[in-house]
Amino acid sequence: MAGRSSSSSSSFRLLDLVRPFVPLLPEVREPDGRRVPFRRKLACTAAALFAFLACSQLPLYGLHRAAAAGGGADPFYWVRAILASNRGTVMELGITPVVTAGTLVQLLVDSNLVRADSSNPDDRALLSAAQKLLSIVITAGEATAYVLSGAYGSVGVLGAGNAVLVVLQLVLGGMVAIFLDELLQKGYGFGSGISLFTAANTCEGVVTRALSPATVDRGRGAEFVGAVTAAAHLLATRAKQAAFFRGGGGGGLPDLRGLAATCAVFLAAVYLQGVRVALPVRPRNAPRGHRGGAYIVRLLYTSGMPVVLLSSAVSSLYLVSQALYRRFGGSLLVDLLGKWTPDAAVPVGGIAYYVTAPASAASAAANPLHAAMYVAFVLAACAALSRAWVVVSGSSSRDVARRLREQQMVMPGMREASMQRELERYIPAAAALGGVCVGALTVAADLMGAVGSGAGMLLAVTTVYQCYEAFEKEKTY
C-alpha cells in the first residue's frame, strides 16, 4: 500500500491541474494536416491586424470624457509602444497578459517546477492550455487592478457599475489579443501575434504623430498635433524655430527634431538587424563538393524580446506602486517602491522613478543621477533578460546543437561533440551584446525625443524583415 501511494504521488504533475479546464477553454483548431495556402495566410494576417487596430481605436464605454482622454493616471505611459496598448481603448492592456503568461510558463518548465515532455503531443497541448488559462487570469487581474489603481479616476467618481463595465471590456480586449495571437501561432498567418501587433502599433503611432491633422490648444492658440502638418503651418506663419523645437519629448507635441531622431533610430535598427555571423553546416552524408548551407547567428539574437519583457515588468511595477501609494503613501517601503504626483500620473521618487525614462535630454542633463541610473538599469536588465531568454526559449547553444543533430546536420571539419562548443563562441555573446544594443537603442530614442520607442521601431523592422522572409519562403511552395 505504501509503495502504491508513493508511486501515485510521484506520478502527479502540476501540469495535470490544467486538464479539467481544457474542455472549457476556447481554442483555434490546428490546420487539418495540409499546408495553409499563401493567400489564406495573407488574408488571415491582414484580418488579425485589422481586428487588433480596430480594438485599439474602440473607446471604452462608461468613462468620463476627461478620463478617456488621459486625465487619470496612466501606468503604461512610458511603455505603450512596446506593449501595443492604446490609452482609453478596449486594447488598453495590449500584449502584456500574453507576454507575462508565456514567460511564466517557460520559466516554470525550465526550472522543472512544471514537468513536461516537449516531444509528447499531450504535454504540448496541456502547456498551451496552461499558458492560455494563465493569460486569461492575468488579463482579469490586470484589468481589475488597472481600474482600482485609479487609471480612470477614483472608483467612487467612476461608479461601481461603470467600473465593472470597464473591467469587462478590458478583459474582452485582452482575450481578443490572446486568440488573435493563437490564430497566427497555429500557422494561419505570418509571424507571431506579439511581434505583429507591436510593429503595427509602433507604425500607427509614428504615422499619427507625424501626420495627424488634429489640433490642440496649449495656451498659444490652436496647434496641429502631427509634426509635419504643424511644421508646414508654422513655417507658413514664419515661426521657424517652433517647427523644429516645440517640446516633443516626454509626451509633448512632436516636432521635426523628433522626426529626424526617429529616422536615425530606424536606420540604426535596420543596420543592427543586418549584423550576423554565418556558420557553415551541411548534411552528414552529403557527397564531397556539396556546398551545404549556413546557420545564421544574428547580433540581435533575441530580437526585441528583452525590452518587451522589461516593459511588461516595469508596467506591472507601476500598477502595484500606484495602487499602494494611493492607499499607504508615506510608508517607508511604499515610498521606496515609488512616489507619485498628486494625480498619480508620473513617478517622482523611489524605484518607479529611477526606472522611468527622463522626459527629454534637457531633463536628463538637469538630473544626471536619474539619467545614469536609468541607462545603467536598462542596459544591464536587457543584457540579463536576453541571456535568460535564450535559455528559456530553447535557443541556447545546447538546444541548437541538438536540433542540428536531429536534422542530420554537421559543421564541416568538426565532430558532433564540438558543434556545441563552436556555437558557444557566438550565441551567448550575441545574446548579451544584442541585449545591450537593444537597450542602448531604446535609451537613445527616449533621450533624443524620437517619435516612437526605439525598441518598438526595432521590433517593427525585425517583424517586417521576418514577414518578408516568410513571404519569399511561401512563394517557393
Image (cartoon, rainbow, N blue to C red):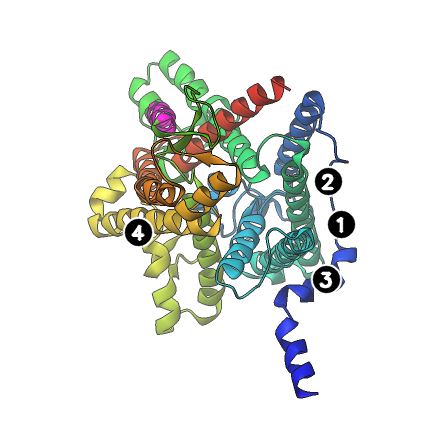
Find disc 4 in the rendering and name its residue. Answer: 377
342 and 399: which is toward the camera: 399
- 167 relative to 415, above or below: below
Q: Earlier in the sequence, mark 4 or mark 2?
A: 2
Q: Is residue 153 visible?
A: no
Q: Residue at x 74, y 31 (%)?
A: 34
Q: Which residue is mark 3?
A: 19
Q: Are marks 4 and 2 in contact (CB under 8 Å)?
A: no
Distance from label 2 to label 1 (Cα)?
A: 13 Å
Element carrying mark 4: helix
Bin the neighbour count of mark 4 within 10 Å (Cα to Cα): few under 14, some 14-19, many 20 and up. some
Residue contact at pointers 1 and 3, CB within 8 angstroms: no
Point out the tag, 1 or 4, that comes first from the N-terminus: 1
Q: Position of residue 442 (x, y in %)?
A: 35, 38
Q: Amino acid at mark 3?
A: Arg
In 3D space, how far apart are the residues under numbered discs 4 and 2 (Cα atoms)? 41 Å
- Whether the residues at callouts 2 and 1 have beta carbons within 8 Å, the answer is no
Q: Which residue is mark 1?
A: 26
The residue where tag 2 is placed is: 30
- Element type where label 3 sits in the image: helix
Magenta residue check for 271? yes
Magenta span: 258-274
